[in-house]
C-alpha cells in the first residue's frame, strides 16, 4: 500500500504555516513547506476577539494552502490552532471558515484547538527527531506569538511540559510601544516575561537538560541575524548553533533597534519586524534561566517543529 501524502497546518498568533510531506523511513520528505505572517492574534490580548481583517488575512492564506494540498494529492490533513484561538470569543467564525476550506481536501476536516500541553509535545517530537539521542535530555522551547512552550524529554519521549502565556506578539502589544522601545518599556517587558516564564520553569525541571533546542520564527530569525546572513536560508539555519554569549548580543541589539533598522536586516521577514524585539526579550529570559540551572552553553536552532510533529502524527 502506498504511504499517504499528508498535510499539516499550524495556525498560531502570528503566522500560519503549511507542510506537505510523504514518509521516508522514520522521517519525512518535504514536498512543500511555507510560512505566511497573517497576525491572526492581532489585538486579541486587548479585545478578546479576532478582528475581521485578521480573519480575512488568514482565510486568504489558508485558501492558497488548500489549493496546494489538493494539487499535491494530500490524503490526510490536520490543522491545529494554538494560543490566539484559545483566547478569542469569536472563534466560531474561525472554525466555520476552516471547515469550509479544509473540507475541500478531506471531507469533514476542520481546525482544532489544541491544549498547550499537546502543542508542547508536538513541538518536541518535531524538533528532536534528527538529533543524536546521546545529546539528551533535551529542553525544547517553542516561542510563538502568544505562548511559549517549554518541554523536557529524551529519546523515550516527553517528561514534562508547560505552555506559558507569553509570546512575541503578546509581549510587544502589552509593553513595547515606542520606536525604539524606551528603557522603562524594556524593563516592564522583562519583568512580565520573567513572571510568566517562572511558571514554566517551576513545572519543568530543566536542571536535567543537556541540550537546548529552539524552534519557531523568533529563534530561526535570531540564528540568521547572528550568522550575518544577507538572506534567509533555512538550510543554513537548520540545526545551527549559537553560543549564549553571541545570542545575548544579538537579542540586545535587536531590542534596541528602530523598526527601520530591523526591517533593513536581510533575513528579517517583514511580518516579524514589529515583534522580534518582544521575541528577543523572551529569549533572553529563557537563556538566563537555562544557563543558571543546567549545563547549557549554546542554543541549537531547528527548522523542524510542531508542523513536523503534526505530520508524523498523521502517519501513526
Image (cartoon, rainbow, N blue to C red):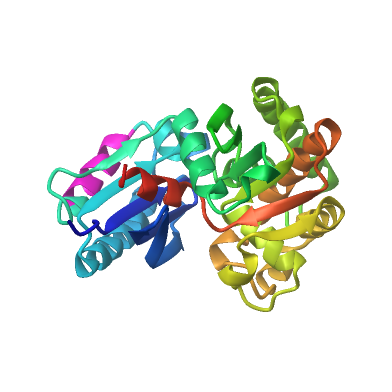
Residue 115 vertical position relative to residue 243 in the rendered view, above or below:
above
User: Is residue 108 visible to the viewer in this orientation of the structure?
Assistant: yes
Res 186 quadrant in image: top right
Q: Is residue 303 magenta?
A: no
Count all numbered tags in the image, as a single digit: 0
Question: What segment carries the magenta color?
Answer: 90-100
Residue 22 vertical position relative to residue 184 in the rendered view, above or below:
below
Residue 55 at x, y percent in the picture: 34, 50
Q: In what quadrant of the picture does the N terminus appear? A: bottom left
Q: Which is nearer the eye, 7 or 261?
A: 7
Residue 268 at x, y percent in the picture: 63, 68
Residue 247 at x, y percent in the picture: 80, 55
Q: Is residue 304 left or right of residue 254?
A: left
Q: In what quadrant of the picture does the C terminus appear? A: top left
Residue 266 vertical position relative to residue 288 in the rendered view, above or below:
below
Q: Is residue 310 left or right of residue 225?
A: left
User: Which residue is pictured at 52% across the width and 35% down the height?
Assistant: 120
Q: Is residue 240 left or right of residue 88?
A: right
Q: Which is nearer the eye, 176 or 35?
A: 35
Residue 52 at x, y percent in the picture: 34, 49
User: Is residue 275 visible to the viewer in this orientation of the structure?
Assistant: no
**Residue occupying the far left of the picture:** 107
User: Which residue is pictured at 67% across the width and 36% down the height?
Assistant: 137
Q: Which is nearer the eye, 308 or 59?
A: 308
Amino acid at each position: 500500500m502506498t504511504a499517504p501524502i499528508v498535510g499539516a497546518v499550524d495556525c498560531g498568533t502570528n503566522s500560519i504555516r503549511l507542510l506537505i510531506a510523504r514518509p521516508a523511513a522514520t522521517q519525512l520528505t518535504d514536498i512543500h513547506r511555507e510560512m505566511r505572517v497573517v497576525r491572526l492574534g492581532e489585538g486579541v490580548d486587548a479585545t478578546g476577539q479576532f478582528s475581521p481583517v485578521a480573519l480575512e488575512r488568514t482565510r486568504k492564506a489558508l485558501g492558497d494552502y488548500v489549493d496546494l494540498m489538493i494539487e499535491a494529492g494530500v490524503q490526510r490533513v490536520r490543522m491545529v490552532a494554538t494560543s490566539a484561538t484559545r483566547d478569542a470569543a469569536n472563534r466560531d467564525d474561525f472554525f466555520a471558515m476552516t471547515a469550509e476550506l479544509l473540507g475541500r481536501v478531506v471531507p469533514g476536516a476542520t481546525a482544532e484547538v489544541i491544549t498547550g500541553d499537546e502543542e508542547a509535545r508536538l513541538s518536541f517530537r518535531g524538533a528532536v527527531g534528527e538529533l543524536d539521542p546521546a545529546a539528551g535530555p533535551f529542553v525544547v522551547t517553542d516561542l510563538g506569538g502568544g505562548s511559549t512552550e517549554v518541554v523536557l524529554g529524551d529519546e523515550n519521549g516527553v517528561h514534562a511540559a508547560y505552555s506559558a502565556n507569553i509570546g512575541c506578539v503578546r509581549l510587544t502589544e502589552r509593553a513595547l510601544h515606542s520606536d525604539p522601545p524606551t528603557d522603562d518599556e524594556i524593563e516592564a517587558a522583562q519583568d512580565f516575561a520573567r513572571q510568566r516564564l517562572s511558571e514554566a520553569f517551576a513545572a519543568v525541571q530543566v536542571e536535567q537538560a543537556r541540550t537546548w533546542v529552539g524552534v519557531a520564527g523568533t529563534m530561526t530569525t535570531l540564528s540568521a541575524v547572528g550568522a550575518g546572513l544577507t538572506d534567509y536560508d533555512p538550510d543554513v539555519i537548520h540545526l545551527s548553533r549559537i553560543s549564549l554569549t553571541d545570542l545575548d548580543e544579538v537579542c540586545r541589539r535587536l531590542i534596541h533597534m528602530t523598526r527601520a533598522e530591523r526591517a533593513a536586516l536581510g533575513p528579517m521577514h517583514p511580518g516579524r519586524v514589529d515583534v522580534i524585539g518582544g521575541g528577543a526579550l523572551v529569549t533572553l529570559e529563557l537563556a538566563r534561566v537555562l544557563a543558571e540551572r543546567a549545563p547549557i552553553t549554546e542554543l541549537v536552532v531547528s527548522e523542524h517543529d510542531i508542523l513536523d510533529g503534526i505530520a508524523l502524527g498523521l502517519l501513526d
